[in-house]
Image (cartoon, rainbow, N blue to C red):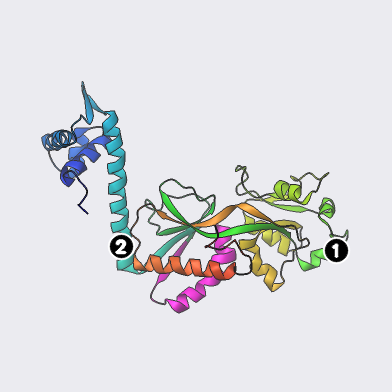
Amino acid sequence: MSAPRLPSLSALRAFEAAARHLSFTRAAEELFVTQAAISHQVRALEEEVGCPLFVRLPRRVALSEEGRVLAEAATEAFGRISAGMEALSRAGATGVVSVSVSPSMAVRWLVPRLESFRDQHPDIDVRISANDRLIDPVREGVDLCIRYGTGRYPGLETTLLMKDEVFPVCSPAFLLKDPPLKAPADLKDHVLLHDDMMKHDAARPDWPKWLEAAGVEGLDPRDGLHFSHASMALDAALAGQGVALGRSTLVNDDVVAGRLVKPFDVTFLSGFSYFIAVPKGAVLGSRVQTFREWLLQQAREFTAGVPGTGPDAK
């Protein structure tokens, strides 16, 4: 198999900088060369590809259609190379794996399991950054993200970690209170606890969807207490303040331990799942790969009793 046909790297670098700035002068300043050198490299590249990459206008330049196509590819390629070098350098120098995850996922699932990773890999340090923003991992120096959603994120490659089941939960003491909570229709007499973190996303799992699946009518699904994070709603449920809509990833540990109970058997599979996300085309260092494989194994063990929800689910 022959090597792919590639232009001169220096010419491509000069073109990418000029295309990004739409200025030969600023490209020259960035690359510490003369404007004439940038112009020469761009001309050479245009001759090689056989078409103009810039439209020369009075006092400025603009990209041609062909130039836009090549500029997007070049910027993405240089970005991948930069991200890979930075990740390898960071991991090799520090032995740290930097992870971005939502606060609720961090508190309810990831942090309680980190001790096992430390026991298995004492030479690898893990830095957890908990936030709800969909960050750019390259820009913020993050090796790996755990994200909740559909798995479609521009510029990122995703791997299914686990799917989520959705069902109501409350404290054991709350279940014994009056009025009774024996059937889904009884929820009309109780406080609903809401997680509003993704309230603007129509696909998110919420009380209206669960109540519809359970066939409950005559109940305003918006009533109750509203919280900005799932973990806060679950803490309110643990404190006996109402019934929360639990996601299996966040509540199964509490259910197994008896801190929370499922008053009904009505469960549905959420349209959202947890995904491992890394920059597209990134070269993952050995430490990041080790942490990624550990995450997948933890997810397999966690979902073992619920077929079709683990990393190997279709």
Question: Residue 153: horizontal and vertical position, in percent?
Answer: 46, 47
Which of pointers 2 and 1 lies earlier in the amino acid sequence?
A: 2
Q: Is residue 124 left or right of residue 80?
A: right
Question: Residue 135: horizontal and vertical position, in percent?
Answer: 45, 50
Q: Which image quadrant: the N terminus?
A: bottom left
Q: Which residues are magenta?
A: 102-128
Q: Is residue 138 above or below residue 14?
A: below
Residue 105 is inside the magenta segment: yes
Label 2 Cα crowd, 10 Å radius (few <14 / some 14-19 / many 20+): some
Question: Residue 187: horizontal and vertical position, in percent?
Answer: 81, 53
Q: Label 2, on which residue? A: 88
Residue type at mark 2?
A: Leu
Q: Residue at x 54, y 49 (%)?
A: 150
Outermost residue, front direction?
1
Can residue 18 be seen here? yes
Q: Label 1, on which residue? A: 177
